Image (cartoon, helix red, strand yellow):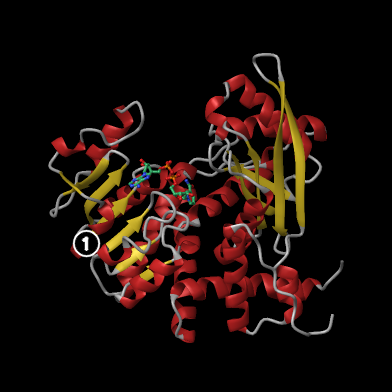
Amino acid sequence: MADNKAERRKSDNVLLDTALQEFYGAADEMGLSEKLIAILSHAERRLEVSVPVEMDDGSVKVFKGYRVQHSTALGPAKGGIRYDTEVDVDECEALAMLMTWKCSLAGIPYGGGKGGIACDPLSMSKKEKEKLSRAFGARIAPIIGDWSDVPAPDMNTGGQEMVWIMDTVSKLHGRFEPALLTGKPIPYWGSKGRTEATGRGVATCGLELMKKLDKNPADIKAAIQGFGNVGSYTAKTLSDAGVKVVAISDITGSYYNPNGLDINKAFEIINHDPKHLLNGFEKFGAEKIEDALFAECDFLFPCARDGVINNQTASKVKAKYIVEGANGPTTPAADKILIQNGALIVPDFLANSGGVIGSYFEWAQNLQGFFWSEEEYNDRLVHIMKGNFNRVWDYAKAKNIKMRRAATMAAIQRVADVVELRGIFL
Ligand code: NAD
Protein backbone atom coordinates (compact mmCIF):
# COMPACT_ATOMS: atom_id res chain seq x y z
CA MET A 1 0.00 0.00 0.00
CA ALA A 2 1.39 3.43 -0.88
CA ASP A 3 2.21 5.56 2.15
CA ASN A 4 -0.09 8.44 1.16
CA LYS A 5 -2.34 10.05 3.79
CA ALA A 6 -4.91 7.50 4.96
CA GLU A 7 -8.52 8.57 5.12
CA ARG A 8 -9.35 9.49 8.71
CA ARG A 9 -12.48 7.95 10.17
CA LYS A 10 -15.04 9.95 12.10
CA SER A 11 -18.02 8.56 14.00
CA ASP A 12 -21.32 9.94 15.30
CA ASN A 13 -20.81 7.73 18.33
CA VAL A 14 -18.97 9.86 20.90
CA LEU A 15 -17.09 6.95 22.42
CA LEU A 16 -15.90 5.62 19.05
CA ASP A 17 -15.01 9.06 17.77
CA THR A 18 -13.00 9.81 20.93
CA ALA A 19 -11.15 6.48 20.66
CA LEU A 20 -10.37 7.13 16.99
CA GLN A 21 -9.21 10.71 17.47
CA GLU A 22 -7.00 9.70 20.42
CA PHE A 23 -5.50 6.96 18.30
CA TYR A 24 -4.82 9.34 15.37
CA GLY A 25 -3.27 11.92 17.73
CA ALA A 26 -0.90 9.42 19.30
CA ALA A 27 -0.13 7.71 15.97
CA ASP A 28 0.79 11.03 14.36
CA GLU A 29 3.00 11.98 17.30
CA MET A 30 4.78 8.62 17.00
CA GLY A 31 5.21 9.03 13.26
CA LEU A 32 3.36 5.76 12.60
CA SER A 33 3.14 4.92 8.90
CA GLU A 34 -0.11 5.68 7.10
CA LYS A 35 -0.63 2.02 6.22
CA LEU A 36 -0.48 1.02 9.88
CA ILE A 37 -2.77 3.92 10.81
CA ALA A 38 -5.25 2.75 8.20
CA ILE A 39 -5.20 -0.84 9.44
CA LEU A 40 -5.37 -0.11 13.16
CA SER A 41 -8.17 2.46 12.83
CA HIS A 42 -10.56 -0.29 11.71
CA ALA A 43 -11.90 -3.27 13.62
CA GLU A 44 -11.08 -6.63 12.06
CA ARG A 45 -14.62 -7.89 12.59
CA ARG A 46 -17.98 -6.40 13.67
CA LEU A 47 -20.59 -9.10 14.16
CA GLU A 48 -24.27 -8.32 14.74
CA VAL A 49 -26.60 -11.12 15.80
CA SER A 50 -30.28 -11.48 16.65
CA VAL A 51 -30.95 -13.05 20.03
CA PRO A 52 -34.46 -14.51 20.33
CA VAL A 53 -35.78 -15.17 23.82
CA GLU A 54 -39.08 -16.71 24.83
CA MET A 55 -40.07 -14.48 27.75
CA ASP A 56 -41.84 -15.68 30.91
CA ASP A 57 -45.20 -14.42 29.58
CA GLY A 58 -44.87 -16.64 26.49
CA SER A 59 -44.06 -13.84 24.04
CA VAL A 60 -40.87 -13.85 21.98
CA LYS A 61 -38.51 -10.88 22.07
CA VAL A 62 -35.61 -10.54 19.65
CA PHE A 63 -32.66 -8.63 21.09
CA LYS A 64 -29.66 -7.29 19.17
CA GLY A 65 -26.27 -8.60 20.18
CA TYR A 66 -22.75 -7.73 19.04
CA ARG A 67 -19.20 -8.99 19.18
CA VAL A 68 -16.44 -6.80 17.81
CA GLN A 69 -12.81 -7.90 17.40
CA HIS A 70 -10.68 -4.82 16.93
CA SER A 71 -7.35 -6.60 16.62
CA THR A 72 -6.02 -10.12 16.94
CA ALA A 73 -2.47 -9.13 15.99
CA LEU A 74 -1.01 -10.01 19.39
CA GLY A 75 -3.24 -13.01 20.13
CA PRO A 76 -6.91 -13.90 20.74
CA ALA A 77 -9.27 -10.95 21.12
CA LYS A 78 -10.03 -10.23 24.79
CA GLY A 79 -12.81 -8.15 26.27
CA GLY A 80 -16.08 -8.14 28.14
CA ILE A 81 -19.69 -8.78 27.29
CA ARG A 82 -22.15 -6.20 28.64
CA TYR A 83 -25.91 -6.20 28.96
CA ASP A 84 -27.29 -2.68 28.77
CA THR A 85 -29.96 -0.69 26.94
CA GLU A 86 -27.27 1.59 25.47
CA VAL A 87 -25.14 -1.13 23.84
CA ASP A 88 -24.53 -0.73 20.12
CA VAL A 89 -21.94 -1.89 17.64
CA ASP A 90 -20.00 1.40 17.57
CA GLU A 91 -19.72 1.46 21.36
CA CYS A 92 -18.44 -2.13 21.19
CA GLU A 93 -15.88 -1.15 18.55
CA ALA A 94 -14.61 1.76 20.67
CA LEU A 95 -14.27 -0.44 23.74
CA ALA A 96 -12.66 -3.22 21.68
CA MET A 97 -10.04 -0.77 20.39
CA LEU A 98 -9.30 0.36 23.95
CA MET A 99 -8.90 -3.31 24.93
CA THR A 100 -6.32 -3.74 22.15
CA TRP A 101 -4.22 -0.96 23.66
CA LYS A 102 -4.80 -2.12 27.24
CA CYS A 103 -3.71 -5.71 26.54
CA SER A 104 -0.77 -4.51 24.51
CA LEU A 105 0.42 -2.20 27.26
CA ALA A 106 -0.10 -4.93 29.85
CA GLY A 107 2.35 -7.11 27.91
CA ILE A 108 -0.09 -10.02 27.65
CA PRO A 109 -0.68 -12.09 24.49
CA TYR A 110 -4.11 -10.73 23.59
CA GLY A 111 -5.78 -8.47 21.09
CA GLY A 112 -8.90 -6.46 21.84
CA GLY A 113 -12.58 -7.34 21.66
CA LYS A 114 -15.90 -6.33 23.19
CA GLY A 115 -19.48 -7.45 22.93
CA GLY A 116 -22.88 -7.03 24.38
CA ILE A 117 -26.61 -7.23 24.09
CA ALA A 118 -28.95 -4.24 23.91
CA CYS A 119 -31.37 -5.16 26.70
CA ASP A 120 -32.53 -4.11 30.14
CA PRO A 121 -31.24 -6.94 32.36
CA LEU A 122 -32.76 -5.37 35.49
CA SER A 123 -36.27 -5.98 34.14
CA MET A 124 -35.59 -9.63 33.24
CA SER A 125 -36.03 -12.77 35.35
CA LYS A 126 -33.15 -15.19 35.96
CA LYS A 127 -34.69 -17.69 33.53
CA GLU A 128 -34.99 -15.02 30.82
CA LYS A 129 -31.37 -13.98 31.37
CA GLU A 130 -30.26 -17.61 31.10
CA LYS A 131 -32.08 -17.99 27.76
CA LEU A 132 -30.64 -14.65 26.58
CA SER A 133 -27.07 -15.66 27.52
CA ARG A 134 -27.34 -19.13 25.96
CA ALA A 135 -28.88 -17.80 22.71
CA PHE A 136 -26.20 -15.10 22.49
CA GLY A 137 -23.48 -17.69 23.19
CA ALA A 138 -24.84 -19.87 20.37
CA ARG A 139 -24.92 -16.93 17.94
CA ILE A 140 -21.33 -15.84 18.61
CA ALA A 141 -19.99 -19.42 18.97
CA PRO A 142 -18.49 -19.40 15.45
CA ILE A 143 -16.10 -16.57 16.33
CA ILE A 144 -15.21 -17.10 19.98
CA GLY A 145 -12.84 -19.70 21.39
CA ASP A 146 -9.84 -20.15 23.67
CA TRP A 147 -7.40 -19.32 20.84
CA SER A 148 -9.58 -16.85 18.90
CA ASP A 149 -11.65 -14.59 21.16
CA VAL A 150 -11.96 -14.87 24.92
CA PRO A 151 -14.87 -12.88 26.44
CA ALA A 152 -15.27 -11.87 30.10
CA PRO A 153 -17.88 -10.19 32.32
CA ASP A 154 -18.58 -6.50 31.92
CA MET A 155 -21.44 -4.16 32.84
CA ASN A 156 -24.39 -6.18 34.27
CA THR A 157 -22.79 -9.56 33.62
CA GLY A 158 -20.81 -11.79 35.99
CA GLY A 159 -19.78 -15.36 36.72
CA GLN A 160 -23.29 -16.78 36.19
CA GLU A 161 -23.63 -15.36 32.65
CA MET A 162 -20.12 -16.63 31.82
CA VAL A 163 -21.05 -20.15 32.93
CA TRP A 164 -24.23 -20.14 30.79
CA ILE A 165 -22.31 -18.96 27.73
CA MET A 166 -19.39 -21.33 28.29
CA ASP A 167 -21.68 -24.30 28.83
CA THR A 168 -23.62 -23.55 25.64
CA VAL A 169 -20.57 -22.96 23.45
CA SER A 170 -18.72 -25.99 24.84
CA LYS A 171 -21.70 -28.16 23.90
CA LEU A 172 -21.86 -26.64 20.41
CA HIS A 173 -18.12 -27.05 19.88
CA GLY A 174 -18.41 -30.63 21.13
CA ARG A 175 -15.58 -30.28 23.65
CA PHE A 176 -15.16 -28.86 27.13
CA GLU A 177 -13.54 -25.44 26.79
CA PRO A 178 -12.97 -23.78 30.16
CA ALA A 179 -10.49 -21.27 28.66
CA LEU A 180 -13.17 -20.05 26.26
CA LEU A 181 -13.91 -17.12 28.55
CA THR A 182 -12.77 -15.74 31.90
CA GLY A 183 -14.43 -14.36 35.01
CA LYS A 184 -15.89 -17.74 35.94
CA PRO A 185 -16.78 -18.49 39.57
CA ILE A 186 -13.95 -20.09 41.59
CA PRO A 187 -15.72 -23.47 42.03
CA TYR A 188 -16.10 -23.73 38.27
CA TRP A 189 -12.68 -23.09 36.67
CA GLY A 190 -12.37 -19.55 38.03
CA SER A 191 -9.22 -18.32 39.71
CA LYS A 192 -8.27 -17.38 43.23
CA GLY A 193 -7.02 -13.79 43.39
CA ARG A 194 -9.17 -12.47 40.52
CA THR A 195 -11.67 -10.62 42.74
CA GLU A 196 -8.93 -8.50 44.29
CA ALA A 197 -6.74 -8.22 41.15
CA THR A 198 -7.86 -4.87 39.73
CA GLY A 199 -7.66 -3.02 43.06
CA ARG A 200 -4.37 -4.68 43.91
CA GLY A 201 -2.99 -3.50 40.57
CA VAL A 202 -4.28 0.07 41.05
CA ALA A 203 -2.69 0.24 44.50
CA THR A 204 0.56 -1.24 43.14
CA CYS A 205 0.78 1.64 40.64
CA GLY A 206 0.23 4.11 43.49
CA LEU A 207 2.94 2.48 45.61
CA GLU A 208 5.39 2.45 42.68
CA LEU A 209 4.72 6.15 42.13
CA MET A 210 5.46 6.82 45.81
CA LYS A 211 8.83 5.07 45.31
CA LYS A 212 9.60 7.29 42.33
CA LEU A 213 8.82 10.33 44.47
CA ASP A 214 10.99 8.94 47.26
CA LYS A 215 8.03 9.00 49.63
CA ASN A 216 7.38 6.63 52.47
CA PRO A 217 3.82 5.18 52.20
CA ALA A 218 3.28 6.00 55.88
CA ASP A 219 3.67 9.70 55.04
CA ILE A 220 1.05 9.60 52.29
CA LYS A 221 -2.62 10.48 52.63
CA ALA A 222 -4.89 8.86 50.06
CA ALA A 223 -8.53 9.33 49.08
CA ILE A 224 -10.50 6.70 47.19
CA GLN A 225 -13.75 7.37 45.37
CA GLY A 226 -15.94 4.26 45.06
CA PHE A 227 -15.92 1.29 47.42
CA GLY A 228 -17.00 -1.47 45.04
CA ASN A 229 -14.76 -4.15 43.59
CA VAL A 230 -11.97 -1.82 42.47
CA GLY A 231 -12.10 0.85 45.19
CA SER A 232 -12.38 -1.48 48.17
CA TYR A 233 -9.35 -3.60 47.25
CA THR A 234 -7.37 -0.52 46.26
CA ALA A 235 -8.08 0.89 49.73
CA LYS A 236 -7.21 -2.39 51.45
CA THR A 237 -3.93 -2.90 49.57
CA LEU A 238 -2.86 0.70 50.26
CA SER A 239 -3.86 0.50 53.89
CA ASP A 240 -2.01 -2.83 54.33
CA ALA A 241 1.09 -1.14 52.85
CA GLY A 242 0.89 1.57 55.53
CA VAL A 243 -0.71 4.38 53.51
CA LYS A 244 -3.10 6.60 55.50
CA VAL A 245 -6.44 6.23 53.71
CA VAL A 246 -8.17 9.45 54.80
CA ALA A 247 -11.28 9.35 52.57
CA ILE A 248 -13.46 6.69 50.97
CA SER A 249 -16.88 6.93 49.36
CA ASP A 250 -19.74 5.17 47.65
CA ILE A 251 -23.26 6.14 46.66
CA THR A 252 -24.17 6.59 50.36
CA GLY A 253 -21.64 9.46 50.66
CA SER A 254 -18.02 10.30 51.41
CA TYR A 255 -16.28 9.51 54.71
CA TYR A 256 -13.19 11.32 56.00
CA ASN A 257 -10.72 11.19 58.86
CA PRO A 258 -7.44 13.14 58.51
CA ASN A 259 -5.70 10.56 60.72
CA GLY A 260 -6.75 7.61 58.57
CA LEU A 261 -9.89 5.45 58.31
CA ASP A 262 -10.32 1.89 59.54
CA ILE A 263 -10.54 0.02 56.22
CA ASN A 264 -11.12 -3.38 57.86
CA LYS A 265 -14.17 -1.87 59.57
CA ALA A 266 -15.36 -0.54 56.19
CA PHE A 267 -15.14 -4.11 54.80
CA GLU A 268 -17.11 -5.43 57.78
CA ILE A 269 -19.83 -2.88 57.04
CA ILE A 270 -20.17 -3.65 53.33
CA ASN A 271 -20.04 -7.39 54.03
CA HIS A 272 -23.05 -7.03 56.36
CA ASP A 273 -24.96 -4.50 54.25
CA PRO A 274 -27.54 -6.11 51.93
CA LYS A 275 -26.52 -3.77 49.10
CA HIS A 276 -22.80 -3.93 49.89
CA LEU A 277 -22.72 -0.25 50.83
CA LEU A 278 -20.98 1.85 53.50
CA ASN A 279 -24.24 2.73 55.31
CA GLY A 280 -23.43 3.85 58.86
CA PHE A 281 -19.62 4.05 58.45
CA GLU A 282 -19.71 7.59 59.93
CA LYS A 283 -20.27 5.96 63.35
CA PHE A 284 -16.71 4.61 63.26
CA GLY A 285 -14.54 7.71 63.50
CA ALA A 286 -15.39 9.23 60.13
CA GLU A 287 -17.04 12.52 59.29
CA LYS A 288 -19.13 12.95 56.17
CA ILE A 289 -17.71 15.31 53.53
CA GLU A 290 -18.96 16.59 50.17
CA ASP A 291 -16.95 14.18 47.99
CA ALA A 292 -13.82 12.04 48.46
CA LEU A 293 -12.69 13.53 45.13
CA PHE A 294 -12.08 16.87 46.84
CA ALA A 295 -10.54 15.56 50.09
CA GLU A 296 -7.30 17.04 51.49
CA CYS A 297 -4.81 14.35 50.43
CA ASP A 298 -1.68 13.61 48.39
CA PHE A 299 -3.00 10.76 46.23
CA LEU A 300 -6.46 10.41 44.74
CA PHE A 301 -7.78 7.12 43.37
CA PRO A 302 -11.04 7.65 41.43
CA CYS A 303 -12.42 4.09 41.40
CA ALA A 304 -16.18 4.62 40.96
CA ARG A 305 -17.14 5.46 37.39
CA ASP A 306 -16.36 7.46 34.27
CA GLY A 307 -16.52 11.25 33.84
CA VAL A 308 -16.44 12.22 37.54
CA ILE A 309 -13.45 14.56 37.12
CA ASN A 310 -14.86 17.02 34.61
CA ASN A 311 -15.08 20.75 33.84
CA GLN A 312 -17.10 21.37 36.99
CA THR A 313 -15.07 19.29 39.44
CA ALA A 314 -11.44 19.31 38.22
CA SER A 315 -10.39 22.56 39.89
CA LYS A 316 -11.69 21.31 43.27
CA VAL A 317 -9.35 18.31 43.28
CA LYS A 318 -6.58 18.90 45.83
CA ALA A 319 -4.48 15.77 45.26
CA LYS A 320 -1.25 16.21 43.31
CA TYR A 321 -1.16 12.56 42.20
CA ILE A 322 -4.10 10.83 40.59
CA VAL A 323 -4.20 7.10 39.87
CA GLU A 324 -7.23 6.21 37.74
CA GLY A 325 -8.86 3.00 38.97
CA ALA A 326 -12.14 3.48 37.09
CA ASN A 327 -12.35 3.53 33.30
CA GLY A 328 -12.31 7.10 31.97
CA PRO A 329 -12.83 8.96 35.28
CA THR A 330 -11.21 12.10 33.84
CA THR A 331 -12.69 13.88 30.82
CA PRO A 332 -10.19 15.27 28.26
CA ALA A 333 -11.02 18.86 29.31
CA ALA A 334 -10.50 18.01 33.00
CA ASP A 335 -7.21 16.30 32.15
CA LYS A 336 -5.94 19.67 30.86
CA ILE A 337 -7.12 21.49 34.00
CA LEU A 338 -5.45 18.96 36.32
CA ILE A 339 -2.20 19.16 34.39
CA GLN A 340 -2.28 22.99 34.45
CA ASN A 341 -2.65 22.70 38.22
CA GLY A 342 0.49 20.57 38.32
CA ALA A 343 -1.07 17.15 38.84
CA LEU A 344 0.50 13.89 37.68
CA ILE A 345 -1.95 11.29 36.37
CA VAL A 346 -1.44 7.54 36.07
CA PRO A 347 -3.91 6.67 33.28
CA ASP A 348 -6.71 4.14 33.64
CA PHE A 349 -5.57 1.62 31.08
CA LEU A 350 -2.25 1.24 32.88
CA ALA A 351 -3.56 1.54 36.45
CA ASN A 352 -6.59 -0.77 36.19
CA SER A 353 -5.01 -3.37 33.90
CA GLY A 354 -4.67 -5.76 36.88
CA GLY A 355 -8.16 -6.95 35.92
CA VAL A 356 -7.24 -8.13 32.45
CA ILE A 357 -3.86 -9.44 33.61
CA GLY A 358 -5.79 -11.45 36.19
CA SER A 359 -8.06 -12.77 33.42
CA TYR A 360 -4.98 -13.81 31.47
CA PHE A 361 -3.87 -15.79 34.56
CA GLU A 362 -7.26 -17.54 34.68
CA TRP A 363 -6.99 -18.44 30.97
CA ALA A 364 -3.40 -19.69 31.40
CA GLN A 365 -4.43 -21.91 34.33
CA ASN A 366 -7.45 -23.24 32.38
CA LEU A 367 -5.29 -24.13 29.37
CA GLN A 368 -2.84 -25.95 31.65
CA GLY A 369 -5.61 -27.58 33.68
CA PHE A 370 -3.46 -26.67 36.67
CA PHE A 371 -4.41 -24.16 39.36
CA TRP A 372 -2.02 -21.74 41.02
CA SER A 373 -2.08 -20.80 44.70
CA GLU A 374 -3.43 -17.37 45.56
CA GLU A 375 0.07 -16.33 46.59
CA GLU A 376 1.53 -17.26 43.19
CA TYR A 377 -1.26 -15.36 41.47
CA ASN A 378 -0.72 -12.22 43.56
CA ASP A 379 3.07 -12.31 43.27
CA ARG A 380 2.90 -12.61 39.48
CA LEU A 381 0.33 -9.82 39.25
CA VAL A 382 2.35 -7.39 41.35
CA HIS A 383 5.53 -8.27 39.43
CA ILE A 384 3.87 -7.51 36.06
CA MET A 385 2.16 -4.33 37.29
CA LYS A 386 5.44 -2.96 38.67
CA GLY A 387 7.23 -3.73 35.39
CA ASN A 388 4.49 -2.06 33.32
CA PHE A 389 4.36 1.02 35.53
CA ASN A 390 8.12 1.45 35.27
CA ARG A 391 8.13 0.92 31.50
CA VAL A 392 5.58 3.71 31.01
CA TRP A 393 7.34 5.96 33.53
CA ASP A 394 10.67 5.55 31.71
CA TYR A 395 9.08 6.02 28.28
CA ALA A 396 7.37 9.22 29.45
CA LYS A 397 10.63 10.56 30.90
CA ALA A 398 12.62 9.63 27.78
CA LYS A 399 10.13 11.36 25.46
CA ASN A 400 9.28 14.16 27.91
CA ILE A 401 5.55 13.50 27.64
CA LYS A 402 2.70 12.81 30.08
CA MET A 403 2.08 9.25 31.25
CA ARG A 404 -1.27 9.02 29.45
CA ARG A 405 0.26 9.78 26.06
CA ALA A 406 3.28 7.61 26.85
CA ALA A 407 1.05 4.65 27.73
CA THR A 408 -0.99 5.06 24.54
CA MET A 409 2.10 5.34 22.36
CA ALA A 410 3.86 2.36 23.95
CA ALA A 411 0.69 0.30 23.54
CA ILE A 412 0.16 1.22 19.89
CA GLN A 413 3.84 0.62 19.11
CA ARG A 414 3.76 -3.00 20.30
CA VAL A 415 0.70 -3.77 18.15
CA ALA A 416 2.13 -1.90 15.15
CA ASP A 417 5.45 -3.77 15.42
CA VAL A 418 3.66 -7.12 15.36
CA VAL A 419 1.39 -6.14 12.45
CA GLU A 420 4.56 -5.15 10.58
CA LEU A 421 6.25 -8.41 11.57
CA ARG A 422 3.32 -10.60 10.54
CA GLY A 423 2.84 -8.69 7.30
CA ILE A 424 -0.37 -7.60 5.65
CA PHE A 425 -2.00 -10.83 4.67
CA LEU A 426 -5.53 -9.84 3.84
P1 NAD B 1 -18.69 -1.65 41.36
O1 NAD B 1 -20.08 -1.55 40.85
O2 NAD B 1 -18.27 -2.87 42.11
O3 NAD B 1 -18.38 -0.40 42.32
C1 NAD B 1 -18.64 0.92 42.01
C2 NAD B 1 -18.58 1.72 43.31
O4 NAD B 1 -18.66 3.10 43.03
C3 NAD B 1 -19.72 1.42 44.29
O5 NAD B 1 -19.18 1.44 45.59
C4 NAD B 1 -20.67 2.59 44.09
O6 NAD B 1 -21.47 2.82 45.24
C5 NAD B 1 -19.67 3.70 43.86
N1 NAD B 1 -20.13 4.89 43.17
C6 NAD B 1 -20.87 4.99 42.04
N2 NAD B 1 -21.04 6.29 41.72
C7 NAD B 1 -20.38 7.00 42.67
C8 NAD B 1 -20.16 8.38 42.90
N3 NAD B 1 -20.65 9.28 42.07
N4 NAD B 1 -19.43 8.75 43.97
C9 NAD B 1 -18.91 7.84 44.82
N5 NAD B 1 -19.06 6.52 44.65
C10 NAD B 1 -19.80 6.12 43.59
O7 NAD B 1 -17.76 -1.40 40.10
P2 NAD B 1 -16.22 -1.79 39.93
O8 NAD B 1 -16.13 -3.15 39.34
O9 NAD B 1 -15.50 -1.47 41.19
O10 NAD B 1 -15.80 -0.78 38.75
C11 NAD B 1 -15.52 0.58 39.02
C12 NAD B 1 -14.86 1.18 37.81
O11 NAD B 1 -13.68 0.47 37.48
C13 NAD B 1 -15.69 1.18 36.52
O12 NAD B 1 -15.33 2.32 35.78
C14 NAD B 1 -15.19 -0.08 35.81
O13 NAD B 1 -15.40 -0.01 34.41
C15 NAD B 1 -13.72 0.00 36.15
N6 NAD B 1 -12.99 -1.27 36.04
C16 NAD B 1 -13.37 -2.36 36.76
C17 NAD B 1 -12.62 -3.53 36.67
C18 NAD B 1 -12.97 -4.73 37.51
O14 NAD B 1 -12.22 -5.73 37.43
N7 NAD B 1 -14.01 -4.71 38.33
C19 NAD B 1 -11.50 -3.59 35.82
C20 NAD B 1 -11.13 -2.45 35.10
C21 NAD B 1 -11.88 -1.30 35.22
Residue 191 is at least partly visible in this image: yes
* Residue at point 67%, 81% (across, down): 32
* Residue at point 31%, 43% (across, down): 250
Kind of residue at disc 1: Cys
Lateral position of residue 186 relative to residue 92, left or right? left
Residue extending furthest top? 57
In the rendered image, which quarter is residue 35 located in? bottom right
Q: Quadrant of the N terminus?
A: bottom right
x, y percent for residue 79: 62, 50
**Does 175 appear above or below 351?**
above
User: Which element type, helix, strand or loop, lies under badge 1?
Assistant: loop
Lateral position of residue 392 relative to residue 36, left or right? left
Q: Quadrant of the C terminus?
A: bottom right
Residue placed most toward the observer, 78 or 384 = 78
In the rendered image, which quarter is residue 2 located in? bottom right
Kindly identify which residue carries mark 1: 297
x, y percent for residue 67: 71, 47
Query: Would you call the spot at circle 1 few (<14 residues within 10 Å), some (14-19), or many (20 or more)?
Result: many
* Residue at point 21%, 62% (across, down): 297
Residue extending furthest right? 426
x, y percent for residue 306: 44, 53
* Residue at point 58%, 83% (across, down): 29
Residue 113 is at least partly visible in this image: no
x, y percent for residue 316: 25, 63
